[in-house]
Amino acid sequence: MRIAYLILAHNQPNQLKRLITRLTEKNADVFVHLDAKSAFQPFEALVKLPGVYFIKNRVKVYWGSFNIVQATINGFYEILATGGYGYINLLSGQDYPLKSNEELLDFLSENPDKAFMNSLVAQTHWLEALPRVQEYHLNNYPFPGRYLVQKAINTLMPQRRIPNDLILVGRSQWFTASVECIKYIVDYWEKHPALRRFMKFTWAPDEFIFQTILYNSHLRDRMVDEDLRYIDWSGGGASPKLLTMEDAPKLISSNKFFARKFDAMKDSAVLDYIDNHLLKK
């Protein structure tokens, strides 16, 4: 079995190169969506690396916006057109593996056709997500004064309802899913334009749209509420804690396959530690 990695990146080409090098060692290819706001020139050298492909249909990505979903979908299209993969693994440029590709492939071979993704049901276990779809959000349209316009719209307009009464499910945008599951997600997305229009005015839809589509399908039993990633949300903010050497013991004991997020410009020692103690490089 081969695995395709889809990496959403926007900066730090050297750190991205390091990540790619760790991912392409056995039965794996890497597809990179580079934010269209980022210049391509600093990343040109990465194109020459074996098993690396840059997504041609780039979009401008803004935090919390619909375009993160579009960037991911564009990546799925190109990966599926290439063919030959059993699983697709979605990462950011600030992720890093904690186990080897061989270990991951063995695990996925033992768990075929699954989707490892956070899948909290919003109505019962993720109430904070409900306003993301019930209200209008203009994150995808970065014009001056948009929050005032957004507030006015939500004052005047009735509460929104997700098309087809889909059950809202999710939590984290990062996941590992079989190609069969990804094909279903892409096909559903393509056949339901009303859902695509609806999602353009939600907040951070990348954290729930893919899980929601799958959960409301005949493939629900393929979902495993485990994203295989170590992420520290102890800070309580909108972004996870930046991992450093002080987190090394937790990374070792986590038994996860990936971790996020890292910044090599602030602490590269933790990546060296992972290489030496977990990946045996």
Image: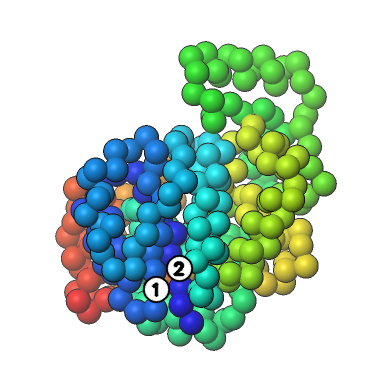
Q: Which residue type does callout 1 highlight?
A: Ala
Side of 102 where 200 appears, left or right: right
| Residue drawn at (63%, 35%) of the image | 200
The secondary structure type at the circle numbered 1 is: strand
Q: Position of residue 165 (x, y in %)?
A: 82, 46
Give yes or no for contact between labels 1 and 2 (Cβ–Cβ under 8 Å).
yes
- 75 lies left or right of 215: left
- Number of numbered discs on residues: 2
Q: Dot 2 lies on which element?
A: strand
Residue 274: x, y in percent? 25, 69
Work out whether mark 1 precedes mark 2 in sequence or the reverse, and give the earlier one: 2
**Image quadrant assignment for residue 232:** bottom left
Alpha-carbon span between mark 1 and mark 2:
6 Å
**Which residue does the image show at 78% across and 50% down from the upper left?**
166
Q: Three-letter amino acid code at disc 2?
A: Ala
Rendered residue at 39%/73% (across/down): 28
Residue occupied by mark 2: 4
Closest to the observer, 118 or 237: 118
Q: Residues within 10 Å of mark 1 (few under 14, many from 20)?
A: many
**Compared to 198, does 264 lie above or below?**
below
* Position of 220 relative to 35 (above/below): below
- The location of residue 264, given as percent across then percent down, is 21, 52
What residue did someone put label 1 on? 28
Which quarter of the image is occupied by the C terminus?
bottom left
Specify the quadrant of the image occupied by residue 276: bottom left
Q: Is residue 25 toward the left or the right of residue 237 in the image?
A: left
Report crowding for label 2: few under 14, some 14 to 19, many 20 or more residues within 10 A (C-alpha): many
Residue 125 percent location from the top left of the image: 68, 52
**Is residue 18 something that shows in the picture?**
yes
